[in-house]
Image: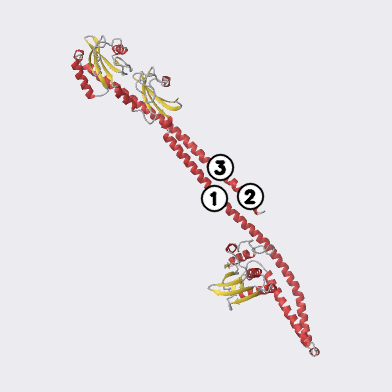
Amino acid sequence: MALYQRKFIYKNLQRKITTIILCVAIFPLIFLGETIYYRFAKTYEEKIEDQIKYRTRSLSDAVEVFLRERTAILATIVDTRSFDDLKQQENLARMFKVISRRTDGLIDLGVIDSAGQHLAYAGPYDLKGLNYFQQAWFNEVMTKGKYISNVYMGYRKLPHFVIAVRGYSNGRGWILRATVDSDIFNQLVRTAQTGMSGDAYIINKNGIYQTAPRFSGKILGKSNISLTLFGQGTTVAKKIKANSKTKHVAGTWLKNNEWLLVITQDVGDEKGGLLTTRNTEIIIIVFGCLAIIMTTFFAMRIIFNHLEEVDKEISELNDQLIQSDKMAALGKMATGIAHEINNPLAIIGEKAGWMRDLLDEEKFQESENFKEYEQSVDKIEEHVERARKITHNMLGFARRMEQRLDDVDINNVLNQTIELLQSHAQISNIKISKDLQSELPIIASDQSQLQQVFLNLINNAIDAVEKDGLIEIKTRKKDSHIVVAIKDNGPGMDEEHLKKVFDPFFTTKEAGKGIGLGLSVSYNIIKKLGGTIKAESKLSEGAVFSIKIPIKIPDKK
């Protein structure tokens, strides 16, 4: 499969796996966030309703206590002081001073007889002498004994309400009446107004404001609140829409179900904390999703880069295996050729020996061409021996088997390899110079694999210098290693090429002159043998390949 096809498959697979992981990770996160928010919002909503109910009940209790206390004060005065005493102006004024020091909330005090005549008055207005017989509240208090009126205008032309208690004197009824301070009462009601939109006010059963609302309407104005929202004597919370805003509304009845205490609050105002929580949750989910996405892409990139590298290595190993199979086949063929060459060489060598035996006879020695015959036989024997050495080296190189440890003389292996390539170098007039340290130790290593490495490096050097070049081969013992240096005076390599020189399939040769596996195979062989190989080169200065082979002393047999 071509490289671009594998890359396409990996990209497609990466895209699918990434999509699946993101869906599996992100959708549950979003669902979990929404579920938590829904549960939290529901609990928060219930808490808001509970709070507004609590505020309503608390204010209701405070208003009831306020009214009961003032009513109790008047009832106590009626029970403890006589009508004749209180109808005296100075006595009533003194009593009002005492009440004002003990409590607040009342702005005047008056005594009214059974005919509705205002007999005595203590307060800021001039109400003495007025008759209230026709006023609705007068009849109510004479009938019920105690009475708290709705807010009304009355003689003073200002909104107010009164608390009145009936007493008896000589079998005739009379009334002690007090006017409630509207400012103090309104302040009491306004204590339940919270936030930017909170409101609290009282309306009567006809929907008329008894206290001033915070935003719209005024005392004695008509409220738009529907009284049917609230049951008798109960506190409920509702949601209504007013002026395009949704509000929480809670109400409870006061004063024997004659007044309705109403508390309202914009839902948006109350949900400020909830919205903050929502925004925080969104930020956390967004950053969580971004973290998941980035981590997934990063992890997938690392994994698939590794897979591509592994696939590339496997592909390269397959190519190397194919090349090895070719080399093995070539080795078998070379073995066959070497055997076929050795057979006629043996015959030629035998016949040359027979010819030398004939030349030893006297009659041949007397021939005038004896010296020429003898020199010819010497040349035949010399070249037969040279050809035999070449085929012997070829057979040694072709017998490549699994890695095994031999007793290896590095100098001897180099000499054999140079003999194999000497003729190839002479064709291009390339000189091979040897500087081999004598008496190098015999080491335990794989001779055939070392010979392949030397063959690759010297052959590459010959290809690099081309014509009229010089190749220098040097061996030295250094510490616990034998160092082999193969240097050429070819064109050299730049840093970019030098970094890739041991990569599989990297080559600087022309097309058709190499596939770029020689140095990669050599690198792997030396590494498996426990050594190292490195390359040094600069443009126009040639190249040096240095091999460090560990000295392992062979076992004594």
Few, some or many residues within 10 Å of mark 1 (<14, 14–19, 20+): few
Residue found at the far front of this picture: 540
Few, some or many residues within 10 Å of mark 3 (<14, 14–19, 20+): few
Q: Which three-letter amino acid code belongs to the residue tagged 3? A: Cys
Q: How many marks?
A: 3
Image location of residue 430, percent across then percent down? 66, 73
Image location of residue 366, percent across then percent down? 80, 90
* Marks 3 and 1, the one that precedes in the sequence: 3
Residue appearing at x 42%, y 34% in the figure: 272
Q: Are marks 2 and 1 in contact (CB under 8 Å)?
A: no
Regarding residue 65, the answer to whether it shows in the image is no
C-alpha gap between disc 2 and disc 1: 18 Å
Image location of residue 149, percent across then percent down? 32, 16
* Label ID, residue 23: 3
Of residues 241 and 114, the one drawn nearer to the viewer in this rendering? 241
C-alpha gap between disc 3 and disc 1: 16 Å
Residue 57, compared with residue 534, is above or below; it is above
Rendered image coloring scheme: secondary structure
* Label ID, residue 9: 2
Identify the residue position indicated by label 1 in the image.
299
Residue 193, compared with residue 285, is above or below; it is above
Residue 52, compared with residue 437, is above or below; it is above
Few, some or many residues within 10 Å of mark 2 (<14, 14–19, 20+): few
Image location of residue 319, percent across then percent down? 66, 59
